[in-house]
Image (cartoon, helix red, strand yellow):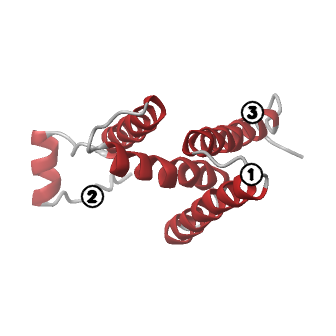
């Protein structure tokens, strides 16, 4: 009986000595969440900070983007990013048009509406994933 062994390259040996490279995705996601949340809070309390505008814009674009991207899990990464960014713009425009059509325009109301829609989308995705599982982990 023979044992088959794979040759290790010098980079594999270096990584084995120094440890695996760190994945920065959770750190970047946490930073983006903090920036977006901070922007929403600054806007809702009416702060005069110069960071209010850019951080609030970041929140208004990224909150629906993340919610839509979570729903489009099966797409390729580039298609998922483009579709979720387009969907984010659509959500923001529909909120603005709806508020203008009903004569209820306010910037605070817009932020609250976008937050509620994004949270609802994330909740629906979570419920769909939790409800779709059976005891064996397979669906019919």
Residue 10 sits in which quadrant? bottom left
Q: Is residue 41 above or below residue 67?
A: above
Which residue, given by chain and number where applicable, does mark 2 sit on?
A: 6
**Foreground residue, 139 or 36?**
36
Q: Is residue 90 above or below residue 53?
A: below
Left or right of residue 102: residue 36: left
**Foreground residue, 9 or 124?**
124
In the rendering, which numbered label is found on residue 39? none
Q: CA distance from mark 2 to mark 3?
A: 41 Å
Which residue, given by chain and number where applicable, does mark 3 sit on?
A: 130
Q: Say few, some or many: other residues with alpha carbon within 10 Å of mark 3 (under 14 / 14 to 19 / 20 or more).
A: few
Q: CA distance from mark 2 to mark 1?
A: 70 Å
Residue 7 sits in which quadrant? bottom left
Left or right of residue 30: residue 5: left
- Element on which disc 1 rests: loop
Which residue, given by chain and number where applicable, does mark 1 sit on?
A: 103
**Foreground residue, 33 or 14?**
33
Q: Position of residue 52 (x, y in %)?
A: 34, 43
**Foreground residue, 61 or 27?**
61
Name the N-terminal-most of marks 1 and 3.
1
Left or right of residue 110: residue 39: left
Q: Is residue 36 above or below residue 62?
A: above
């Amino acid at each position: 009986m023979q044992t088959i062994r794979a040759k290790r390259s010098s980079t594999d040996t270096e990584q084995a000595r120094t440890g695996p490279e760190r994945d920065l995705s959770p750190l970047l996601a946490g930073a983006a969440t903090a920036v977006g949340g901070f922007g929403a809070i600054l806007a809702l309390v009416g702060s005069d900070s110069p960071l209010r505008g850019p951080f609030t814009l970041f929140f208004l674009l990224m909150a629906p983007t993340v919610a839509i991207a979570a729903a489009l899990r099966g797409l390729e990464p580039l298609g998922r990013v483009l579709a979720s960014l387009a969907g984010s713009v659509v959500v923001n425009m529909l909120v603005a048009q709806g508020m203008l059509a009903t004569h209820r325009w306010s910037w605070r109301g817009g932020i609250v509406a976008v937050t509620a829609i994004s949270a609802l989308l994330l909740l629906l995705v979570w419920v769909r994933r939790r409800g779709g599982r059976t005891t064996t982990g397979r669906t019919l």
